[in-house]
Image: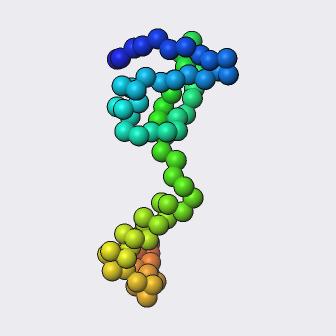
Amino acid sequence: MERQIVRISSRNQVTLPRRIMDSLSGSTYFEVALEGEHIVLKPIDIRAKGETLAKVREKIRSLGITEDIIPLAVAETRKRYR
C-alpha cells in the first residue's frame, strides 16, 4: 500500500496525492468512514440524475425492443415463475 504524509488545512481539507488519485480512474466522490483510529475513503460512483436511465434506454433501443413487445415479455416471464 502506498503511503504519503498529507496536511489538513485550516478548513479541514486534505489534498490527496496525484499518484493515488490517478490510480482511482477519475473518482471524484468518496464515502468517508471512521474505522477505529483510521479514516477510510472509498471511491463511489455518483451519476447525474437520469444518466443511468439514458444508458438503459439506449441499450433497449440497440436491442430493438419496442413498447409492444414488453407486455408479451412480462406475461411470458410470469408464466415461468408461477
Residue sitting at x 56%, y 22%: 14
Q: Quadrant of the C terminus?
A: bottom left
Quadrant in the rendering for residue 74: bottom left
Which residue, as the protein is rendered here, is positioned at the far bottom? 68
Q: Quadrant of the N terminus?
A: top left
Indicate left or right for 76 with 52 as reference: left
Classify 1 as above or below 70: above
Residue 79 visible:
no
Q: Give 66 or 11, whichever is nearer the viewer.
A: 11
Classify 68 as above or below 41: below
Which residue, as the protein is rendered here, is positioned at the far left? 63
Which residue, as the protein is rendered here, is positioned at the far right? 11
Classify 62 as above or below 7: below
Q: Give 14 or 39, whichever is nearer the viewer.
A: 14
- Where residue 47 appears, as percent x and y from the top left, is 51, 52
- Where residue 68 appears, as percent x and y from the top left, is 43, 88
- Where residue 72 appears, as percent x and y from the top left, is 41, 84
Quadrant in the rendering for residue 24: top left
- Where residue 19 appears, as percent x and y from the top left, is 36, 25
Q: How is the image coloured?
A: rainbow
Q: Give 62 or 11, whichever is nearer the viewer.
A: 11
Residue 16 visible:
yes
Residue sitting at x 67%, y 17%: 10
Quadrant in the rendering for residue 59: bottom left
Residue sitting at x 57%, y 58%: 49
